[in-house]
Structure formats: C-alpha cells, structure tokens
Amino acid sequence: MSDTTVVPHDVLVKKIYDRLILAGIAQDQALIEAEIMSEADLLGVPSHGVRMLPPLLKAIDEGRVTKNPQFANVRQFGAIAVLDCNNGPGRYASQKAMQHATTLAQEFGVGVCLAKNTTHWGRAHAYANRAAQAGFIGICTTNAIPTMAIGGAKKAVIGNNPLAIGIPGANPAEPIVLDMAMSQAAVGKVGTWLREGKNLPGNWGIDAGGNPTSDAKAILSGAVLPMGEHKGAGLAVMFELLTAALAGAAFTQQIFSNDPSGLDPQASKIFIALNPAAFIDPAEFQQHVSGFIHYLKTDAAPFSYPGERGWQTRDQQLKEGVTLHNEIVQQLNGVDISFK
C-alpha cells in the first residue's frame, strides 16, 4: 500500500481555501494563503506546504493569529515603508509587503518594506519569486523562534532566519530563486526526513543534551546547527538585527516566550525590491543573466540554477497531481479536509 496520496493541484488549493473561509478568513487573504501554502508542495517542498494548515487554524481559533488584521503603514520615508501587520496570516502579509516594495521600486528604483507583527510566512521562496516574476529582483528575510544552536550553546538560541533572493530568468514564469535557511537543514526539512523514516545526511543538529546527531527525531528535540558553522551563525545574527532591531520589535527569544508554537507571532520581516531598469536596460540585463546561466550549464554540467528543480517538479505535478504523504493527509483529515 502506498504511503502517499496524489491530489490535483487545483483541488488542493480549493480545499485549503474553503477551509480558511470556514475559519472566517476574508476571501482575498484566504486565496493568497491557499495558493502559497499549496505552492510549496507543488514545487516539491512539503516541509513548508499544506502540513502547516492545521496549526494555523488552531492559532486562528485561539486568537494567536489575527483572523482579519488591520494593516497600518506606520512609517514612510521615500523608498522605505514600515508596515504593522497586526499578526495576521503570514503569507498574505508577506505577499502584500513584497508588493509594496515592488511598487516603491517602480517609482524609486529600489523599494524596502519592513513588516512587523507578522506570523509564519511558510516558504521565503514565494515572495522573492513573485517579485522576480513581476520583473524585479526580490530579497527577503525574517526572524523566528530559536531553532538553531550557535557559538557555545547546547540548545537553540536563534532562529534559522531564512533568506530568499529572486532574479528574473529567461522564462518570466521561472525566475532564478535561492531560498535557504541559515542552518544546515530547515527544521521543516528535518520533520520531512522524520516522516519518511530517514536520518539526516550528516550530524546537522544536536539532541536535547547538546550532542551532535543525525537522528531527525533527536534534532527536533534539540536544535539544528548553522551551515558553514560561524558563517551561517553570523548571517543569522545579522538577519535578526536587520529585522527585529530595525523594527524595534521582538527578538527570537521574545517571540518564543510569547508563543513557542512556531507560528512566530510578532516576528519581523524585511522585503527589498530592486528595479533592474534603474541600473541597466532590462533586455541587456536579461542577456547577461541568460549568458551566465548558459556558461554554468556548459562548464559546470550537470548544473541546476537555484530553484530550477522546483520548476521541473511543478511541471510534473501540474500534469500528474501533487504528492502528499499520508501522514499529512491524515492531519488534514483532522481539520475536516477530505480528498475522497
């Protein structure tokens, strides 16, 4: 018996959307949440996909995520904006913040939107990708609850503070998108390995006693470790300061003390958009990008540019359906979503 279920992508989006509407989320917010949440599974990243719906619904029910938030533009200075997102659904807030950054970049050549009082955004890829699909260079990062041990710590002391960068590609629908946590593996990926009965490729985390381990279950009780040791640690610290300090908002340990669930209410995110037309003729820029990717495809073969495998997985799953692990299907059944 297979341990997976295949669901048509449009059916998956509609099921998530309908359940969010039932929870009282406004239609425009529910649609963005459903699209971005389902997109992670579509691109082959189930760690950040629809498995995140049940905890989101619980947080909405308990009031830890604001059902229908009131956004406030609390500061505007030229190409810079600061939004208070009222701890609303994080994907919707993040998409609106990146859209605001691209609007500013259209006028000023660059746009920066700092979003405070946000919740978990799912996958960073979504926002850098959408900026790039619109013809901009998109950059974003966030802070989060502690999941990573750095320095001499034997426990999690900082979030893995992911970074995404999106650059328009030769195919406007398939930008070059880097999305990476500052840890060796994102916590959600560790959960995926556990669900699939796999150990991590190396000692990428520590257990609750602070001992290095490749055991996924033990790491989820302990902490992940930074990529490149001090390099990943240093980047995580800088992104914490670039978000929480700049917003005058909660740092990683304060987010955890207020809500240890991982929904990250009171987190801060920064969204940066660059308009290539402010620097160079867009057609010339595209020629340079395409030429460099062609060089790497030739001289570094086999080579996949950042995000390329996701587009390939998307094309396959749009035809064949999105594959969901049955454990995730059961979790969705638990919130009254059925695919039968």
Image: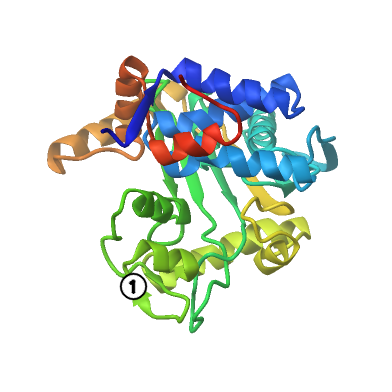
- Image point 53% across, 21% down: which residue? 13
Count of numbered circles on the image: 1
Judge the density around disc 1: few (<14), some (14-19), many (≥20) Cα neighbours within 10 Å.
many
Viewer-nearest residue: 332 or 59: 332
Q: Position of residue 336 (x, y in %)?
A: 60, 29
- The quarter of the picture where residue 127 lies is top right
- Image point 69% across, 43% down: which residue? 58
Residue 62 is left or right of residue 272, and the answer is right
Q: Position of residue 114 (x, y in %)?
A: 71, 46
- Image point 66% across, 53% down: which residue? 264
Q: Is residue 82 visible?
A: no
- Image point 71% across, 45% down: which residue? 59
- The quarter of the picture where residue 82 lies is top right
Q: Position of residue 22 (x, y in %)?
A: 71, 24
Viewer-nearest residue: 194 or 179: 194
Viewer-nearest residue: 77 or 271: 271
Q: Is residue 81 above or below residue 222?
A: above
Q: Is residue 66 visible?
A: yes
Query: Tag 1: residue type?
Result: Thr
Residue 50 is left or right of residue 33, and the answer is left
Q: Position of residue 149 (x, y in %)?
A: 49, 73
Residue that mark 1 sits on? 213
Q: Is residue 54 above or below residue 19?
A: below
